[in-house]
């Protein structure tokens, strides 16, 4: 059974920024999103649990600088994408 992937408004803005920055970044992000729709805990690629303000969220690298940040809502089987650019901004 697959997971539903939803985007916050910030993630939608980040997706537009990512697409305009580089087709390769867009392709890599789409591959990660496809993976999340199948199993948000699948490894590789590795993910890390975040702390601080983003406690409860996970992060995967799109490239060396950009991250895909998401929350997993187990009961609803939803992956909520919070950021697609960087969680440092």
Image (spheres, helix red, strand yellow):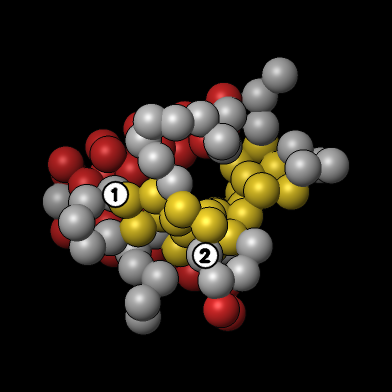
Q: Is residue 38 above or below residue 5?
A: above
Q: Is residue 58 above or below residue 76?
A: below
Q: Is residue 62 above or below residue 33?
A: below
Q: Nearer the viewer, mark 1 or mark 2?
A: 2
Q: Residue at x 84, y 42 (%)?
A: 75
Tell me which corner region of the image, top left, top right, bottom left or bottom right, holds residue 83. Answer: bottom left
User: Percent position (x, y) of residue 88?
Assistant: 36, 77
Q: Quadrant of the C terminus?
A: bottom left
Viewer can see residue 16: no
Q: Is residue 2 left or right of residue 17?
A: right
User: Percent position (x, y) of residue 15?
Assistant: 37, 56
The Cα atoms of the two marked residues, 1 and 2, are separated by: 16 Å
Tell me which corner region of the image, top left, top right, bottom left or bottom right, holds residue 33. Answer: top left
* Label 1 SS: loop
Q: Residue at x 35, y 58 (%)?
A: 67
Q: Residue at x 70, y 43 (%)?
A: 78
Q: Residue at x 66, y 48 (%)?
A: 72
User: Percent position (x, y) of residue 70?
Assistant: 55, 55
Tell me which corner region of the image, top left, top right, bottom left or bottom right, holds residue 79. Answer: top right
Q: Is residue 81 left or right of residue 47?
A: right
Residue that extends furthest to the top in the rendered view of this protein: 1
> Reading the chain from its start, which is encountered first: label 1 or label 2?
2
The residue carrying mark 2 is: 50
Pick whichever, 77 or 7, lies toward us: 77
Q: Is residue 59 above or below residue 38?
A: below
User: Percent position (x, y) of residue 26?
Assistant: 27, 45
The residue carrying mark 1 is: 62
Q: Local crowd at mark 2 within 10 Å, few (<14), some, or many (≥20)?
A: some
Q: Local crowd at mark 1 within 10 Å, few (<14), some, or many (≥20)?
A: many
Q: Quadrant of the N terminus?
A: top right
Viewer can see residue 29: yes
């Amino acid at each position: 059974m697959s997971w539903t992937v939803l985007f916050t408004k910030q993630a939608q803005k980040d997706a537009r920024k990512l697409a305009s920055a580089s087709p390769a970044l867009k392709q890599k992000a789409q591959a990660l999103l496809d993976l999340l729709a199948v199993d948000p805990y699948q490894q590789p690629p590795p993910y890390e649990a975040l702390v601080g303000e983003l406690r409860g969220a996970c992060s995967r690298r799109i490239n060396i600088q950009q991250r895909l940040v998401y929350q997993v809502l187990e009961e609803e089987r939803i992956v909520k994408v919070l950021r697609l650019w960087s969680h440092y901004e």
